[in-house]
Amino acid sequence: MDYYELLGVKKESSPSEIKKAYRKLALKYHPDKNKGEKKSETKFKEINEAYAVLSDPEKKKQYDLYGSTDFHQRYSQEDIFRGFDLNDVLRQFGFGGANQSAHFRSGMGGGNGFSSFFNQGQAGGCGGGCHSTAEKGQDMTYQVTVSLEEVLNGSERTITLRKNGTPQNVSVKIPKGIEAGKKLRLQGQGGNSRNGGPPGDLYLKVDIASNSNFLRDGDDLIIQKLITFSEACFGATIEVETLEGKKFMVKVAPGTTHDSRLRLKGYGLPIGPLGERGDLYVKIGVKVPKDLTEEQAKAIQELRDCGL
């Protein structure tokens, strides 16, 4: 669905114009004015979803950047309505909140006043005496493992899933900065309905593959470099390669201790699809040899005699 088309506004419309358009449609399609009309109820849900996105500057920016299809791969219904208080919005427009309506009360629980009502009819649920409708297919969840390189650059993957016993290829875009546990939503790619309703959605739960060189710490990366005891004492210059393959010569100061960290600003992972990057930290380790030559053992003995 095109949110701008739903509200009858344009991309360049101001926040006040978007709000005005939403208010006009909310008045027109509010369930209290259209009791028992399933089309009006569906339209009311859609315009609230559109307003939840277009009234939020960050979500609107993401929607404008990626378009409807890609946006819905990145944002679940929970993400879309996070921070959107339906009761508060309706009160602003003189409805007294969602709880004013008996139709709303029959289907709504707690939270922001959204989840129960807006999921009615999508999985066969119905409240307040509404008529039975075609049941939505079952949502499906699969796990997808992505590399740190994909977190850095984003990617487009084709994965093979089994639906109803049949292999099916699905294309999915991995956004930059994706975090472990995040779910990517593929609308209409879930199970088929049993009675002619819309298919369910497919959720891909993201897991991040381990990397032999880098450890992720939020939006930062950590790489370990080992130096000798003499380098720790006198200082050294070491080569550090970033995740994208850039190489830097980094100075280790004299007297550097074990587990000290050096920072390369802006060479971590993206902070979300459009955010800046975190930092790369070089964790210094001091090598302790397991076996010593006779000459090395003598030198170490002399160091110990000197108090080192």
Image: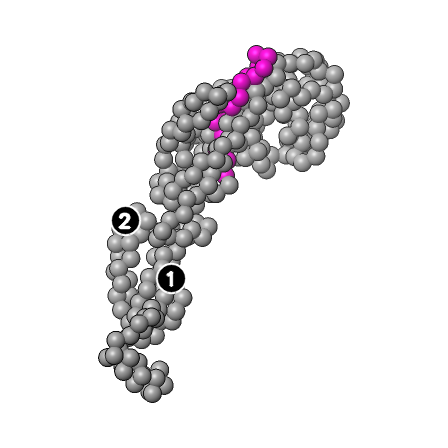
How did the renderer colour the structure? one colour
Q: Up-down: is 154 above or below 29?
A: below
Q: Position of residue 128 (x, y in %)?
A: 74, 19
Residue at 46% from the left image edge and 50% from the top image edge? 218
Residue kind at label 2, given as amino acid type: Gly
Q: Is residue 72 visible?
A: no
Magenta stretch: dominant secondary structure: loop
Q: Position of residue 153 (x, y in %)?
A: 35, 40
Q: Is residue 213 visible?
A: yes
Q: Give residue 170's quadrant in the image.
A: top left
Label 2 Cα crowd, 10 Å radius (few <14 / some 14-19 / many 20+) = few
- Gap between marks 1 and 2 measured at Cα: 18 Å
Secondary element at tag 2 = loop
Q: Is residue 196 magenta?
A: yes
**Label 2 belongs to which residue?**
245
Residue at 58% from the left image edge and 36% from the top image edge? 82
Q: Is residue 231 left or right of residue 118?
A: left
Q: Up-down: is 243 above or below 240?
A: above
Closer to the camera, 130 or 206?
A: 206
Q: Position of residue 81 (x, y in %)?
A: 58, 33
Residue kind at label 1, given as amino acid type: Lys
Secondary element at tag 1 = strand
Label of residue 283 in the image: 1
Of callouts 1 and 2, which one flags the residue occurring earlier in the amino acid sequence? 2
**Which range of residues does the magenta coloring cover?**
182-198
